[in-house]
Amino acid sequence: MGTAGGYLKKHTEALVKDVGFEAACALSGKSKATLGRYYSDSPEHEDRFMPIDAVAALEKAARFPHVTAALADLRGVTISYSGSREPRSGGVNADVVALSQRFASLMGEYNVAIEDGIISANEAKRLLRETNEIQQVLLEMRLHLEDETVG
């Protein structure tokens, strides 16, 4: 499996976990085992990916469009996300504060992760979660900046 396949599988897993297994099964019409195969890195499942209609259904229920964002990243495309979540009030200044707090949290997680010289799977997941949170703050910051330039 190439780097892109592994990257998509990790984001597929994040999507399923964001929605929750039971809800993901109901929304996609797939079993837990089938959903697991879509993000499994086992050689026998390396060519199995979630169908796009299932991705769309899950991303509609998720807090963040994980797979869509991953596809955009792989293409070098920047997307603007305005989820149903209400953006933070306070504008750009609040975004800068939130960004610095999230970055500090990421650096704390990284410091813990590298203490033994090896980043475990669980540590990598925590780092990924923090980077996704930073990405969300940056997207909200972008929306605030776009609002300020339009107004």
Image (cartoon, rainbow, N blue to C red):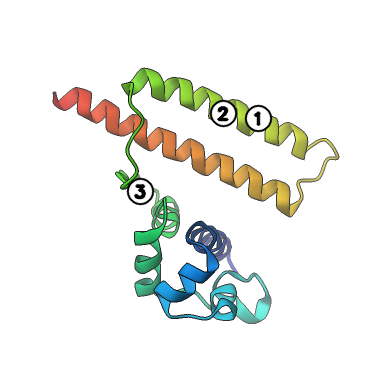
The residue carrying pointer 1 sits among few (fewer than 14), some (14 to 19) or many (20 or more) residues within 10 Å by Cα, namely some
Name the residue beneath numbered marker 1.
107
Q: Residue 103's mark? A: 2
Residue 67 vertical placement versus 24 (above, below): above
Q: Amino acid at mark 2?
A: Phe
Inter-mark Cα distance, 1 to 2: 6 Å
On the rendered image, what quadrant is the C terminus found in?
A: top left
Which of the two marks, 1 or 3, is nearer to us in this view? 1
Where's residue 78, x and y in %? 35, 44
On the rendered image, what quadrant is the N terminus found in?
A: bottom right
Q: At 52% across and 63% down in the image, what residue appears?
A: 20
Secondary structure beneath disc 3? loop
Where's residue 114, x and y in %? 78, 37
Inter-mark Cα distance, 1 to 3: 26 Å
Q: Amino acid at mark 1?
A: Met
Farthest-out residue, right? 116
Q: Residue 33's mark? A: none
Residue 37 vertical placement versus 143 (above, below): below
Residue 19 vertical placement versus 42 (above, below): above
Name the residue beneath numbered marker 3.
77
Q: At 28% across and 33% down in the image, what residue appears?
A: 143
Q: At 83% across and 40% down in the image, what residue appears?
A: 117
Secondary structure beneath disc 2? helix
Q: State which tag comes first along the sequence, 3 or 2.
A: 3
Which quadrant of the view contains residue 21? Answer: bottom right
Which of the two marks, 3 or 2, is nearer to us in this view? 2
Where's residue 84, x and y in %? 31, 47
